[in-house]
Amino acid sequence: MQTGIILAGGESSRMGHDKSLINSNVSRLANELRIAGCTRVVVMCGSAERMALFDEECIIDSKESLAESLFDFITELNGIVQLASCDAYLADAELFSNINGVPTDDFGNRQPLLAKIDAHDLQRSSKKISEMFQHIQSCEGGIKARNINTPEEFKEILSYLN
């Protein structure tokens, strides 16, 4: 079984509003994850109040940090886990199908929130995502692995969106 986890926990201070609601990206990512072979898709939505925002199965964060919440959830799963950050507006089934580890974007930055791992490979809980995934190998992701944090970055990738 392959589980897709979409990370859509809340409003972004740098973006100025909730990135998960831009361009219906959570629904789009859920479809792309299914095309890529995920038999279950779950949205980590942050709080119970956010559950109504999404059509997918939702879970709320169980701990203080995203990293700790993600660790708790992944360690309950079996099989392959594909993460998908709600601000990965260019991520698609082709990217998800080709990920084996932590993808690097077109700037060479590791993007652990797009990692594909065996659930049993996640051995270390931390308050920082980067520390939790530091032992997972990198793989090529290119521009499709880029995440967007500011309105300027979003404007830059608009030409790539269909």
Image (cartoon, helix red, strand yellow):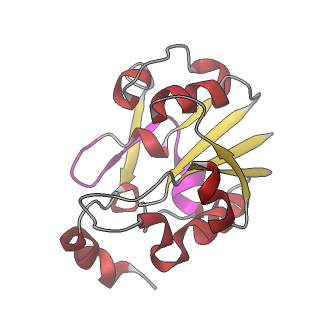
**Nearer-the-camera pick, 64 or 2:** 64
Q: Residue at x 73, y 53 (%)?
A: 37
Image quarter of the N terminus: top right
Q: Residue at x 58, y 48 (%)?
A: 47
* Number of numbered discs on residues: 0
107 falls in the magenta region: yes
Q: Position of residue 137 (x, y in %)?
A: 42, 27
Q: Is residue 87 left or right of residue 40?
A: left
Q: Position of residue 2 (x, y in %)?
A: 74, 42
Q: Position of residue 48 (x, y in %)?
A: 64, 50
37 falls in the magenta region: no
Q: Which residues are magenta?
A: 94-109
Q: Position of residue 92 (x, y in %)?
A: 54, 65
Q: Is residue 119 left or right of residue 127?
A: right
Q: Is residue 17 left or right of residue 54?
A: left
Snapshot quadrant of residue 59: top right
**Nearer-the-camera pick, 39 or 100:** 39
Looking at the image, which residue sits at the far front? Answer: 49
**Measured along the vertical axis of the image, is residue 116 above or below residue 47?**
above
Snapshot quadrant of residue 90: bottom left
**Nearer-the-camera pick, 7 or 88:** 7
Q: Residue at x 26, y 43 (%)?
A: 109
**Measured along the vertical axis of the image, is residue 63 above or below residue 147?**
above
Looking at the image, which residue sits at the far top? Answer: 123
